[in-house]
Structures are given as structure tokens and as C-alpha cells.
Image (tube, helix red, strand yellow):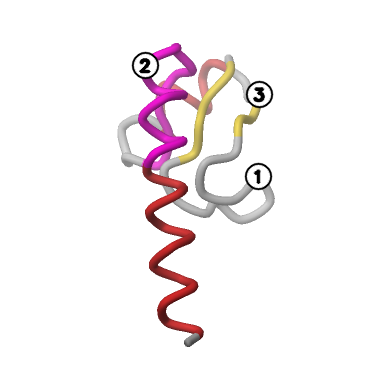
Amino acid sequence: MNLILKKDVSNLGRFGAQVRVAEGYARNYLIPQGLAVPVTPAAIKQFAAEKDAHLKKMQVRKD
């Protein structure tokens, strides 16, 4: 199952990354814990905007 990560997950990926995992892992752990969402065109668009906002926030913190 393909997912987009909503948070950093150790040994899997960082926020906004698209990953492929077993369906059981996705349905029983990642999705219920709020760590990931299934890949859809709407989810891709939403996370692109959130990732840009996150990067801008991180840039402001560096300055």
C-alpha cells in the first residue's frame, strides 16, 4: 500500500515522503496512529502545501 507520511517515522521516512508498506502495517498501525494517509491526488496536493509551509517555518527558525 502506498502512503504519504504525516510525521517522521523511524526506519521508514520523513514527513511528506511517499512510501510503500504492507497493508497490515498501514491499516493497523500507521493510519490509525495518524502517522500516514493513503496516496490520492488530493492528499498529494495537500501535503505539497503543508510541506512548503513546514519548510518556510523551519527557515524562519534558522534565521
Q: Which residue is found at the position 62% from the left and 20% from the top?
A: 22
Residue 45 at x, y = what percent? Answer: 42, 25
**Which residue is denoted by mark 2 in the rendering?**
42
In the picture, residue 38 is in which quadrant? top left
Q: Which residue is found at the position 61% from the left and 56% from the top?
A: 10
In the picture, residue 41 is in which quadrant? top left
User: Could you tell which of marks 1 and 3 lies nearer the N-terminus?
Assistant: 1
Callout 2–callout 1 Cβ contact below 8 Å: no
- Where's the N terminus, which quadrant? top right
In the picture, residue 47 is in which quadrant? top left
**Which residue is denoted by mark 1 in the rendering?**
12
Magenta-colored span:
35-49
Q: Is residue 47 left or right of residue 16?
A: left
Q: Is residue 42 above or below residue 11?
A: above
Disc 2 versus disc 1: distance between alpha carbons? 22 Å
Disc 3 versus disc 2: distance between alpha carbons? 18 Å
Q: Amino acid at mark 1?
A: Leu
**Which residue is denoted by mark 3 in the rendering?**
20
Tell me the crowding category of disc 3: few under 14, some 14 to 19, or many 20 or more residues within 10 angstroms, Cα based: some
Check if residue 42 falls in the magenta segment.
Answer: yes
Residue 6 at x, y = what percent? Answer: 42, 43
Q: Is residue 31 above or below residue 22?
A: below
Q: Which residue is found at the position 37% from the left and 30% from the top?
A: 31
